[in-house]
Amino acid sequence: MRLLILGTGSMANQHAKNFGAASGVTVVGGVDVVPERLEAFCAEHKIGKGFSSLDDAFAWNEFDAVANVTPDAIHHPTTLRAIAAGKHVFCEKPLATDYAKAMEMTEVAEAAGLVNMVNLTYRNVAQLQKAREIVTSGQIGNVKHVEASYLQSWLVSKAWGDWRTESQWLWRLSKKHGSNGTLGDIGIHILDFASYGAGLEIDHVFARLKTFDKAPGNKIGEYELDANDSFAMAVDFDNGALGVIHATRWATGHFNELRLRVYGEKGGVEVQHRHTGSQLRVVLGDDAETGTWKEVDVPPVPTNYQRFVEAVRAGKNQEPSFRHAANLQKVLDLAAVTDRERRELPTH
């Protein structure tokens, strides 16, 4: 498979490394509107061709698939062009900035019979995969309650840099600069973590969004700090289970941590994922009577990158697909509406 990487910002380095290490895959080109960034990226990853526009890349056309690592708002037009040219697409999250665009991308890709996947990176967590296997096999019985959280602390800690002075962080706090805050940035990750791990789809949603004062007048230079910092979401799943999902950038002491707890009538599973490692604990069978939780060792699983390569080779799509990401985007869109209107909404 010959791969073109569209967009050469920081996340593109992960695409180049992972696809470059895959058997039978050659990263043949990169595309970026910033010449210096493109040149440095191609030199670092030994990529032979660099293009300043998608038009130039398509005029060359010697590639089979596209890894779309452009900014969120650019996913829609560039992916549609790639699909029209008959290219398989591996797109960064979120698939699009709203459900209508995401569904258009989905339907066009499916109609073309092309492989379409979204890089929801926490699918690479083996403990999450195993938790889903335990839940969907019926070992914990009917799921009744789900808790999920995504905790970050970069608004309190300088471990990742100082958001007060660095534009790479400030734009994430400003709607005018394209941010939909915590909901738009990491909301899709924790929704996927929860629904995938529980083996359930979200049926109803009610959310509250919160933006805290962070500077005088909530403004730093050209950046108006008006994007949401935290959200709390109550959901009903399609089997009737209740879920509580929340995320924040104010979680002091938690650099980047996802948690999932799924409880059924016969047992439960708990997943914790941090940048330092992951853990799966279960309470099953007689242990439920004594409250005895046991840690489960889990071997690594294929990454999204590897599964995209397999999907292209087999000509058969794998998850997470465009359609799955579009359905999650619908929940995110509705969450913002429920916050404004203060009422629960169905997802279908």
Image (cartoon, grey):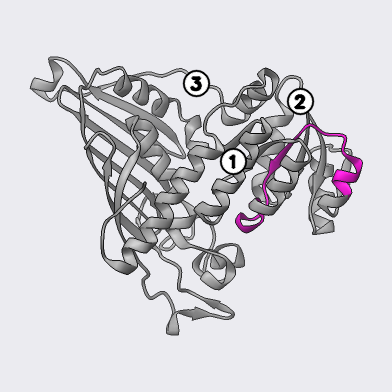
In the depicted structure, whether residue 143 falls above or below residue 118: above
In the depicted structure, whether residue 273 falls above or below residue 76: above
Q: Identify the mark at residue 300; answer none if there is no mark.
A: 3
The residue stretch that appears in magenta: 56-75
First along the sequence among labels 1 and 3: 1
Gap in angstroms between the C-alphas marked 2 and 3: 21 Å
In the depicted structure, whether residue 238 falls above or below residue 36: above
First along the sequence among labels 2 and 1: 2
Q: Are marks 2 and 3 in contact (CB under 8 Å)?
A: no
Q: Secondary structure at mark 2?
A: loop
| Whether residue 51 is visible | yes
Which residue position is annotated with label 2? 25
Q: Identify the mark at residue 107; answer none if there is no mark.
A: 1
| 15 or 85, nearer to the observer | 85
- Which image quadrant is residue 236 in? top left
Mark 2 or mark 1, which is nearer to you?
1
Q: Position of residue 141 (x, y in %)?
A: 20, 22
Q: Position of residue 91 (x, y in %)?
A: 63, 42
- Which residue is at 50% across, 45% downward? 326
Q: Give the residue type that dot 1 points to.
A: Glu
Q: Give the residue type that dot 2 points to.
A: Val
Mark 1 or mark 3, which is nearer to you?
1
| Whether residue 95 is visible | no
First along the sequence among labels 2 and 3: 2
Q: Give the residue type that dot 3 points to.
A: Pro
Mark 2 or mark 3, which is nearer to you?
2
- Quadrant location, the N terminus: top right
